[in-house]
Amino acid sequence: MFDPKSRYVRLTLYATVDHRGRTVAVVPVPPAPNDVALGIHLLRQGERVDHLAARYLKNPAGFWRMAEINAVMLAEALSERPEIIIPSPRAS
């Protein structure tokens, strides 16, 4: 169901019943990463969060880490900020 590199791959799904009475699988919220700030990026017009993740984290799919360290729910909310905290890249 998830990519092997996904932060959700090791989580145990659970079942619940929705408002229509159907049993559905639910993905729990993963724990927040223990990231340390690398620095702050001053956002310029036209910059995209996935491009910043590729630049700083060497992984365009790592934009969620920038959302987490900036305490926003959606990565798109980062585009509204003039300054974005950048997490340190992880050793692979």
Image (cartoon, rainbow, N blue to C red):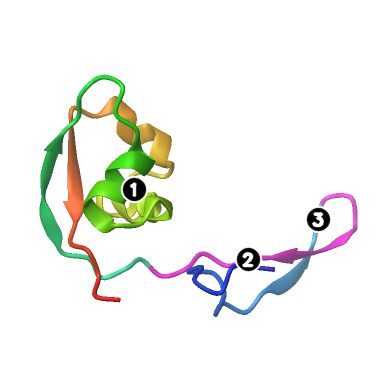
Other-residue count near label 3 (Cα within 10 Å), few / some / many at <14 / 14–19 / ≥20: few
The quadrant in which residue 44 appears is top left
Point 54% across, 80% down: residue: 10
Query: Which numbered disc flags the more N-terminal residue, 3 or 2?
Result: 3
Say which amino acid is labelled 3: Asp
Is residue 22 covered in magenta?
yes
Look at the image and tell me in which quarter the N terminus lies.
Answer: bottom right
Side of 42 where 3 appears, left or right: right
Other-residue count near label 2 (Cα within 10 Å), few / some / many at <14 / 14–19 / ≥20: few
- Look at the numbered discs 1 and 3 and tell me whether their residues touch, using CB distance below 8 Å: no
Q: Nearer the viewer, residue 70 or 52?
A: 52
Q: Residue furthest top?
A: 45
Q: Position of residue 7 (x, y in %)?
A: 48, 69
Residue of label 3: 18
The stretch of residues the image draws in magenta is 19-31
The Cα atoms of the two marked residues, 3 and 2, are separated by 14 Å
Question: In this picture, is 79 found above or below 37?
Answer: above
Q: Position of residue 57 (x, y in %)?
A: 26, 57
SS under mark 2: loop
SS under mark 3: loop
- Look at the numbered discs 3 and 2 and tell me whether their residues touch, using CB distance below 8 Å: no
Say which amino acid is labelled 1: Ala
- Look at the numbered discs 2 and 1 and tell me whether their residues touch, using CB distance below 8 Å: no
Residue of label 2: 27
Point 34% across, 33% down: residue: 48
Look at the image and tell me in which quarter the C terminus lies.
Answer: bottom left
Residue of label 1: 67
Is residue 28 covered in magenta?
yes
Question: In this picture, is 83 found above or below 5?
Answer: above
Q: Position of residue 29 (x, y in %)?
A: 51, 64
